[in-house]
């Protein structure tokens, strides 16, 4: 009986420590912007956008030169980054006639804080930004697109799967399934998947309020009804390139897959070439009826 109680106490301690570690992983350290629109010769309008839970988002609108309402894209950064990480994409998009709304999600950049960050909350903020864009007088509300990188790329697919007013989606360097991400994270913490890791995954599902299988990119992409570009760096050491292939394989008729040679996960130098690829895709997708 004593041995049983000791074992039970150890199990409880391990579970509590694991829960604490997982809670800590949801916290984000805010970093100063890596660059400003002015550094690239861009003119930006800073705005505040209301989102869920009474919070507001900081964003900057970089309008394309146009005499009338222009097509527009919401651009969402990855975990721990901010709007400035995607600035190198903007010149090519503007030159293609696309207005770009760069958004800081909650707990990132200059947006409001919240209790925690998660991929579904990234998607909520993308939805709020799309609603704001659709009301802007210089935006063509019938030609809206979503672009995201890493966690933002997964969130872009989730946000688009919930709407019918999106004309194109670009997902860059996204993971294919949250359970796989959690397994890798728990492995680094030296937490065995059975039973503790499995319980930790179910705990995270309870915290974020969503089942992994439902919000996984390999699932959400099947619910999207517009053109999709899946981009991934061949040299990505953060998210394996196999994730992009798995996402594309889930909806091969709906998506295009571009594996970019000599490209990593989030190197700013890579984004200039990526910007031209994304711009070419959006020009065609947003021109279609």
Image: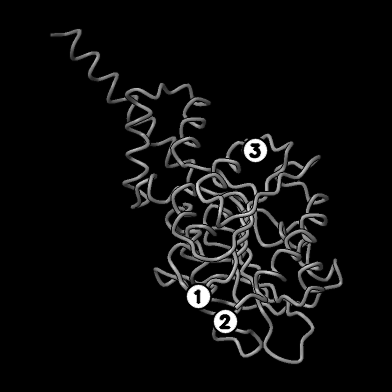
Does label 2 or label 3 sit earlier along the sequence?
2
Within 10 Å of disc 1 (Cα), the crowding (few <14, some 14-19, many 20+) is some
Query: 58 or 211: which is nearer to us?
Result: 211
Q: Compared with residue 112, is residue 205 higher up or lower down, i.e. above or below?
A: above
Within 10 Å of disc 3 (Cα), the crowding (few <14, some 14-19, many 20+) is many
The x, y position of residue 247, in whole percent, is 54, 46
Residue occupying image coordinates x 51% and y 72%? 56
Q: CA distance from mark 2 to mark 1?
A: 7 Å
Does label 1 or label 3 sit earlier along the sequence?
1
Which residue is identified by label 2?
A: 142
User: At numbered mark 3, what does the secondary structure look like: helix, strand or loop?
Assistant: helix
Query: 21 or 132: which is nearer to us?
Result: 132
Which image quarter: residue 17? top left
Does label 2 or label 1 sit earlier along the sequence?
2
| Callouts 2 and 1 close, C-beta under 8 Å | yes
Q: CA distance from mark 2 to mark 3?
A: 33 Å
Q: Compared with residue 269, is residue 160 higher up or lower down, i.e. above or below?
A: below
Which image quarter: residue 144? bottom right
Residue occupying image coordinates x 42% and y 69%? 52
Which image quarter is the N terminus in? top left
| Callouts 2 and 3 close, C-beta under 8 Å | no
Which residue is identified by label 1?
A: 165
- Residue 241's tag is 3
């Amino acid at each position: 009986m004593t041995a049983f109680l000791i074992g039970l106490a150890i199990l409880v301690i391990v579970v509590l420590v694991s829960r604490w570690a997982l809670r800590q992983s949801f916290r984000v350290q805010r970093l100063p912007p890596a660059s400003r629109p002015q550094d690239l010769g861009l003119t930006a309008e800073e705005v505040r956008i209301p989102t869920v839970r009474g919070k507001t988002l900081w964003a900057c609108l970089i309008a394309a030169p146009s005499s009338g309402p222009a097509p527009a894209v919401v651009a969402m950064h990855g975990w721990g980054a901010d709007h400035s990480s995607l600035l190198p994409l903007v010149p090519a998009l503007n030159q293609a006639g696309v207005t770009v709304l760069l958004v800081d999600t909650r707990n990132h950049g200059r947006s409001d804080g919240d209790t925690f960050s998660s991929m579904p909350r990234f998607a909520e903020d993308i939805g709020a930004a799309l609603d704001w864009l659709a009301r802007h007088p210089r935006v063509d509300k019938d030609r809206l697109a979503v672009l995201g990188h890493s966690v933002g790329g997964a969130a872009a697919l989730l946000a688009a799967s919930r709407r019918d007013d999106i004309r194109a989606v670009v997902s860059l360097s996204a993971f294919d399934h949250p359970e796989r991400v959690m397994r890798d994270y728990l492995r680094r913490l030296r937490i065995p998947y059975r039973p503790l890791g499995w319980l930790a995954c179910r705990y995270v599902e309870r915290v974020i309020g969503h089942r992994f299988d439902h919000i996984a990119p390999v699932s959400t992409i099947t619910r999207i009804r517009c053109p999709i570009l899946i981009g991934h760096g061949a040299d990505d050491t953060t998210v394996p390139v196999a994730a992009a292939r798995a996402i594309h394989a889930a909806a091969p008729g709906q998506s295009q897959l571009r594996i970019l040679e000599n490209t990593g996960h989030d190197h700013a130098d890579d984004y200039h070439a990526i910007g031209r690829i994304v711009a070419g895709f959006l020009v065609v997708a947003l021109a279609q009826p």
